[in-house]
Amino acid sequence: MEDFVNYRSALSFSFVISLSFLCLSVVSSREAKHEGFSIELIHRDSPKSPFYNPNETPNQRIRNAFRRSINRLDRFHPNFVSSDTAQADIIPNSGSYLMNISIGTPPVEILASADTGSDLIWTQCSPCQRCYKQDAPLFDPGKSSTYKDTPCSSTQCSSLSKTSCSPDGKCLYSVSYGDNSYSNGNLAIDTVTLTSTTGQSVPFSETIFGCGLANDGTFNRKTTGIVGLGGGSVSLINQMGTSTAGKFSYCLVPLLSGNSISSKINFGSNGIVSGPGVVSTPLAAKDPKTFYFLTLEAISVGDKRIVFGGSSFGNSEGNILIDSGTTLTILPEEFNSELLSAVSSFISAEPVQAPNQNFDLCYDAGSVSQVPEITIHFTGADVKLSRSNFILNDDQIACFIFTGSDGPAIYGNIMQANFLIGYDTEKQTVSFKPTDCTKE
């Protein structure tokens, strides 16, 4: 499991969620369920991002993103899934997301790495026994009037796989990640507040989180912990479930749309995906529940339908996971070779040397004037891709974003761009709607 999550995090393409807490109008979580709310997503290389480097050119940013994607490929091992592993890897320095939330009463702003492949929310707390350096002050639970430690006998404590009891009966949590990062501390309950794009503050009381007292790893000084957005019981998504009806969606702008354009993530009624063009596919129920598993039946290249034989997830239901934090689309080697062979048969030019090991099929940019129509066939949902969903151009070279691996199959975020993608964790479905995310 750890090797997979390392691999998955190394393939992360970074965004930043901007959720700055503002002392503006406050709506209750009950109102949020009916009205819904949205949050801005900002690309890692945007001037709004703390990781922004003004000296990099757009092409350098692209290459750096994919260089991050291959940093840990050699550490991958296909036998990664185990039913008793609750957490997925995240490498905050490479970053899946950064997310400003507020914890406590009065609310204290927390800047944390967030990811659809992790569950537990945690932040560094004082008095910290062993913490990595961070720019912001540590969260002080003694100053929050709504903070409570959870007892060992609580259902919240038993919901995590690695817990223990302190001498005074408090629940102690321990989470570790594939890059050897870790957090240990008190499992606690407090109010978590989010701020929507309209400026409304949306509080969620009685939220489970980890108050980290011993934390270390590859964390950046600008990050104070992790916010889990996965499918597990203690993720932010599931803890918001009764207030947002278990619904959220996002609309990712294409990779080369420009740094000033932001994506959005939507919750509650705002997270419902409906209208013309919507197709839906079931979420497969399998372990680990953190991940969002779909069933890929085939991929069509023009009129040629290539049946998907499965991956290390198996060859039946739940054979691919959809992940907003993975850049490329990862497929089994044999299937990927057949797919790219079908793609290359449509292009008269000769392939050229790939700029790095990420890419399996590249051409001179000027020679790829026409490309085949590609359709992803999930169970019950045919998703027709646009050119920008499967081919990436810079000034000189055009590369297809499918890549082969002996490990898991992952539906990456380039393929998700310009689709409004909705997750309904109550109905257990994922929906796709073609959308211009630059205008959404």
Image (spheres, grey):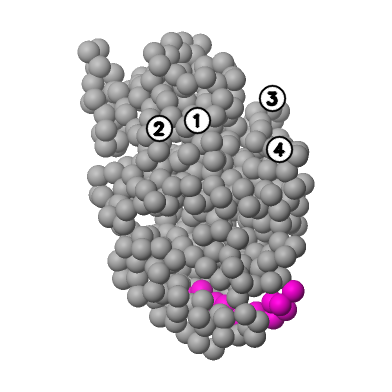
Say what amino acid the circle numbered 2 marks: Ser
The residue to which callout 1 is attached is: 219
User: Marks 4 and 2, Cα distance to the nearest angstrom?
Assistant: 25 Å
Between 420 and 318, the one lying in front of the other is 318
Q: Is residue 364 left or right of residue 220?
A: right
User: Marks 4 and 1, Cα distance to the nearest angstrom?
Assistant: 18 Å
Dots 4 and 3: beta carbons under 8 Å? no
For the residues carrying marks 3 and 1, which lies nearer the camera in this image?
1
For the residues carrying marks 3 and 2, which lies nearer the camera in this image?
2
Is residue 378 depicted above or below 407 in this figure?
A: below
User: Marks 4 and 3, Cα distance to the nearest angstrom?
Assistant: 30 Å
Q: Which residues are magenta?
A: 366-377
The residue to which callout 2 is attached is: 181
Is residue 435 depicted above or below 54 in this figure?
A: below
Is residue 207 depicted above or below 45 in this figure?
A: above
Dots 1 and 2: beta carbons under 8 Å? yes
Dots 4 and 1: beta carbons under 8 Å? no
Tell me which label, 3 or 1, sits earlier in the chain. Answer: 3
Between 438 and 343, the one lying in front of the other is 343
The residue to which callout 3 is attached is: 23
Dots 3 and 1: beta carbons under 8 Å? no
Horizontal and vertical percent position of residue 245: 49, 49
